Amino acid sequence: MIAPSCLVAAVLLIAPPGLFERAQAARDALDYARARALAERALEAGGHDLGATLGLYRLLGEILAGLDQPDAATSVFARLLALDPAASWPEGTSPKIVQPARAARARLAGRRLGLGTRRVAPGTLRVVLEADPLEMVARVRVRCGSAGAFEAARAAVLDLPLAEPCPRADVVALDPHGNELWRATDLAKGSSPVAATPAPPLYADWRAWAIATAVLAAAGTTFALLHLRAKAELDEVNRDSARREFTDARALESRGRWTALAANLSLAVAGATGLVAGLVWLRGGRHEEATVVGVGLAGRF
């Protein structure tokens, strides 16, 4: 079973449209009474996915906190945290919001909504309501691909039919309005999710070496130009030595030495990292089709 730990509450609401956005706009305009009415209407309209449900509970709790109703805000935040214990607020959030949220977390004492799924027979998925501390679940829906969905009323244990073959069953817990409260995917024995191709470690990725080469080459070029500038200024001081201070020449000579050293080191290391980038690419570290242009860097200042 694959269960989501946290969903971002970037909300795309179902009909009636715009209620979340209107509630949010009213809250931002400090019209908390109107914002509350709109948020409650949105929840009662139902049909929201899990991310939208989380977003609405979060918004409604903040609105109630703004209305100086900490007990009501605590109750709503408890619903949010029962679904998403990782929900948090950024540092600097108003104590009006933070305090009810802390009270809600303390009220739950680590409890959260949880269901379990397993195949008990061909064509049958058992769904166990493991924990529902606030008794939010009204129905459970299971869907197997495009074969349609089957819903059943809340029960401690439900044996739901599946259209076989069903390698992947999507299971959703719903509130009385049809808002999603929990979602998971049950995989048939022998099935496995498609694994994402892991990213190569940094040292095995030719692009990392190529970027290092480019940065070092740019630094070496910059130091080389600074060296040439210092050398030109030193030549000018030497030509006009009768009117220039000896300390000016010493300072320019020192600048010329360290910029030459920095340029030589940067270009030498750039050459080495460029060679490594080419070798990693040739040995299979490219991980995708690519065209490589080799650049040779050499020089001494």
Image (cartoon, rainbow, N blue to C red):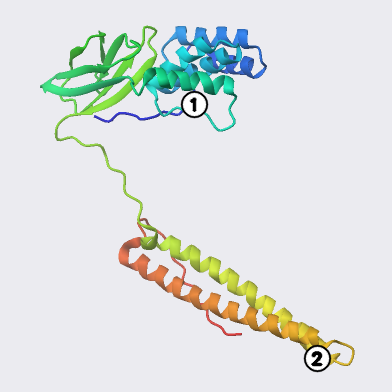
Residue 250 shown left or right of residue 299 in the figure: right
Evaluate whether residue 12 shows in this view: no
Name the residue nearer the viewer: 228 or 162: 228
Q: State the image coordinates of residue 275 (x, y, percent, origin top left).
A: 42, 73
Kindly state the secondary structure of the residue where label 1 is placed.
loop
Please name the amino acid that badge 1 sits on.
Answer: Ala
Query: What residue is rendered at 43% in x and 23% in y?
Result: 51
- Quadrant of the image occupied by residue 237: bottom right
Residue depth check, mark 1 versus mark 2: number of the one nearer the observer:
2
Q: Is residue 33 left or right of residue 103?
A: right
Instruction: Give whichever of 40, 276 is nearer the camera.
Output: 40
Residue appearing at x 32%, y 23% in the figure? 183
Sequence order check, earlier mark of 1 and 2: 1
Residue 238: mark in rendering: 2
Classify 10 Å Cα crowding around label 2: few (below 14), some (14-19), many (20 and above): some
Say if 241 sits above or below 1 in the image.
below
Query: Which residue, given by chain and number where applicable, does mark 1 sit on?
Result: 10
Image coordinates for residue 18, horizontal then vertical, percent: 55, 15
- Quadrant of image for the C terminus: bottom right
Residue 206 image position (x, y, % from top left): 40, 63
